[in-house]
Amino acid sequence: MATATVTAGSIPARPAAPALPADHMPVRRVIAFLAMVFGMFMAILDIQIVSASLAEIQAGLSASSDEIPWVQTAYLIAEVVMIPLSGFLSRMLSTRVLFTIAAAGFTAASALAATATNIDQMIVYRAIQGFIGGGMIPSVFAAAFTIFPPSRRAVVSPMIGLVATLAPTIGPTVGGYISHAMSWHWLFLINVVPGILVATAAWTLIDFDKPNLKLFSKFDWWGLAGMAAFLGCMEYVLEEGPNNDWLQDQAVFLCAAVMTIGAVLFFWRAFTAEEPIVDLRAFTNVNFAFGSLFSFVVGIGLYGLTYLYPVFLGRIRGYDSMMIGEALFVSGLAMFFTAPVAGILSNKIDLRLMMMIGFFGFATGTWWMTHLTADWDFYELLIPQILRGCSMMLCMVPINNIALGTLPPERLKNASGLFNLTRNLGGAVGLAVINTVLIDRNAFHYARLAEHVQWGSAEAQQKLQNMTMNFEQTAGLDATKAAISKLSGMVQQQASLLSFMDVFYMLTVLFATLGLFVLFIRKPADQAGGGGGGH
């Protein structure tokens, strides 16, 4: 940062000398940082942008229902490998080179994905897109805490927090609109022009650090192989396990075995290699370790609810992707308007208190959802969504500051990769647990409800009789069969609703517990605006 020595009360000799040296930021760096933030936004948005449009992509590529989830899974697996690797690559190549390659490669892979004519091509292009794009995400977090003085973090931290949480939240909404208004190809083509601009800005403007090409000779290939096997297979097991009876499925079992071997190799190399692929020593910083734990749980809430709300609206209410997007934009708005408030509060109050308010707010929103009925629509979901959006921002800003604000600059690049990885892994673990609970509890509730809807039940027989009489008035229907089918559907719907309520109850307990757990963290030694340097 530029420094100028101006004594109190003296007048600068030239207007160019900054009056507030500690706060002075070259415009070039600010523009470079904004370009990086936009690149990160695109990379995170693309995880979820296809989720509401998978049916359209499936039809366009003539893919089976088993194959189409790989459009999302391939991206996630590749990205989760790149995120921790990016710290080493950034030190070796410099932020400028890594970010430019990541932005340009992401743009090229986006264009290729739009040209895919079959599912195999799409999966390969999405994997390339996820892997290369993943390099942009940690670079932004590292840059924010390297180039900005602590006094500016009240502005910077909410910005990256907003992007990290808003992008996956509005992904389904944006994707739904694009695929309805144009075609699914535009889900990918929309990245091309902004991607070219981001890559150009990164190459032209980023000057934060210098490359260290000597690190290439120390590159730990075995560590990379172990990490790729460990993280990639873990992502697959967590994605596919719930729907395939976990280890009973051969592919899931094989991946679990490879994951275990990869984990052993990765951790062995992490502690013995001269220059490990991922430096785990950042976890010796207590604040970073706690921040990563909280980031993991925020990942569960962030990706879990981004998944749960659309599934509820699609399965119970029968909404299409456009209607789901319109119903769920409230969370994104709440995040957007809470971001500046969170920035101001991070300067004014104890970060631990902010996190506690955020966690309890999130728990209140999920507790509200435990009273779900089949009639819930936009207005019933309004308050839970506002609570979710506001609370997510109140959590993210202090978590970023606590985790990364007190690390020395040389640890930041590796640490920001690990920090972002914990959020993605939280999302993967959360989705696996949520899916498993939904499947198991749905079967449990259906069995319990079916016990009461039997021939011996006077109430059930009366209901069936009334429904049969209604169907008899409709020509061309076997009234008894139609009534039994309708009654079975009602039982299935109630069982599904009860399983959703169980998941929301589980999330309520998790976030309320974390709200109490915040009390055990040490007060951060140096808060965002406290004036003390974090480095």
Image (cartoon, rainbow, N blue to C red):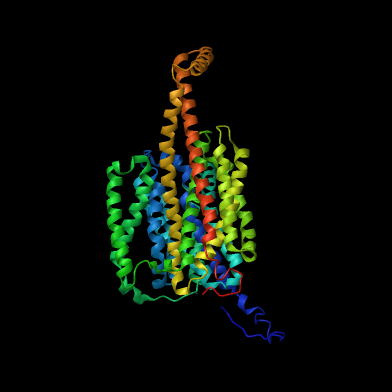
Q: Is 417 rendered above or below residue 436?
A: below
Looking at the image, residue 506 sits to the left or right of residue 21; the answer is left
Q: Is 339 rendered above or below residue 283?
A: above
445, 482: nearer the viewer: 445
Q: Where is residue 345, by image quadrant?
A: bottom right
**Residue in the picture at 29% in, 45% down:** 251
310, 452: nearer the viewer: 452
Looking at the image, residue 226 sits to the left or right of residue 344; the answer is left
Quadrant location of the N terminus in the rendered image = bottom right
Question: Which percent across, then down, holds residue 10?
Answer: 71, 86
**Residue in the picture at 48% in, 71% down:** 407
Looking at the image, residue 458 sits to the left or right of residue 232; the answer is right
**Residue in the picture at 60% in, 59% down:** 353
Whether residue 110 is visible here, answered yes or no, is: no
Whether residue 529 is visible here, answered yes or no, is: yes
Question: Which percent across, then down, holds residue 243?
Answer: 37, 40
How many numbered marks are there?
Answer: 0
Question: Which percent across, then down, holds residue 104?
Answer: 44, 62
455, 10: nearer the viewer: 455
Q: Is 429 rendered above or below residue 194?
A: above
Question: Which percent across, then down, holds residue 368?
Answer: 58, 42
524, 132: nearer the viewer: 524
**Residue in the picture at 37% in, 59% down:** 81
